Image (tube, helix red, strand yellow):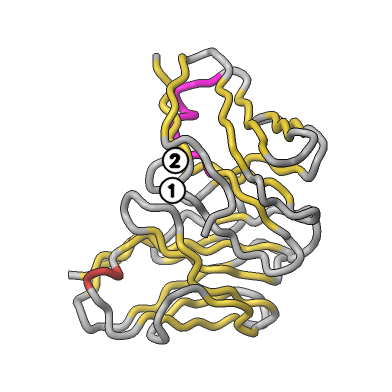
Amino acid sequence: ETGVTQSPTHLIKTRGQQVTLRCSSQSGHNTVSWYQQALGQGPQFIFQYYREEENGRGNFPPRFSGLQFPNYSSELNVNALELDDSALYLCASSPRQPNTEAFFGQGTRLTVV
Amino acid sequence: DAKTTQPPSMDCAEGRAANLPCNHSTISGNEYVYWYRQIHSQGPQYIIHGLKNNETNEMASLIITEDRKSSTLILPHATLRDTAVYYCIVRVAYRDDKIIFGKGTRLHILP
């Protein structure tokens, strides 16, 4: 158990719809990062939030957006879903201090049909 | 791009030590070496990390060469539950915290 929880664990959406995924960070961690993992690939960095501000973004289009709340929990929103958005979405939280580890949640499996 | 290079797959007999190598020849002075593993369809699990000294915890040992250009993760007594993809990562935890994953090593533990 890492203390990082994600919801829902699985969901199925139709192409063109919008989806919101949620992540509760570990207590004391002020940074949340989101990753997309397609089948058979390593996780790919989407973006990161630090103290409620976006603080770095990977090569993902603007229809991937997010929020971080004052309690450091976070949401990932994806608009206009495409079939290729089907993946495991992971969030990781960290305290953004030297010599510390990031902990991952168990992920949300999104299937777009 | 990932800053590490790992073999795509390895086999290890159950009960033996599993030694997973990683090359990180361009590592910077303030970058730590981290190891994570991912069991099928689960979130990556933190294993161990280090800067330049060898490290040991209840899960594994990490051996970093003196020039810091490579490292080895050692699972001392591998079990079937250690079958997973192992990722070696270099990271500066207090700077941007994002993790760039490579392809990792798929470790098969053989009964």
Does any portion of residue A28 appear in the rendered image? Answer: no
* Disc 2, SS: loop
Which quarter shows the C terminus of chain A?
bottom left
Between A16 and A108, the one lying in front of the other is A16
Residue at x-position 66% and y-position 70%: A31
Indicate the position of residue A29 as horizontal and vertical percent values: 70, 66
Q: Residues within 10 Å of mark 1 (few under 14, many from 20)?
A: some
Q: Are marks 2 and 1 in contact (CB under 8 Å)?
A: yes
Task: Identify the amino acid type marked 2.
Answer: Ile
Residue at x-position 61% and y-position 51%: A2
Residue at x-position 55% and y-position 22%: B18
Task: Identify the amino acid type marked 1.
Answer: Gln
Between B52 and A79, the one lying in front of the other is B52
Q: Is residue B79 magenta?
A: yes
Is A110 placed left or right of A56 in the picture?
left
Chain under callout 1: B
Indicate the position of residue A42 as horizontal and vertical percent values: 43, 53
Residue at x-position 67% and y-position 37%: B70
Indicate the position of residue B62 as horizontal and vertical percent values: 70, 33
Count numbered badges in the picture.
2
Query: Would you place residue A86 above or below residue B89 in this image?
Result: below
Q: CA distance from mark 2 to mark 1?
A: 6 Å
Name the residue carrying label 1.
B42
Q: Which residues are magenta?
A: B78-87
Figure quadrant of residue B49: top right
Chain under callout 2: B
* Disc 1, SS: loop
Indicate the position of residue B14 as horizontal and vertical percent values: 47, 15
Name the residue carrying label 2.
B39
Q: Is residue B64 magenta?
A: no
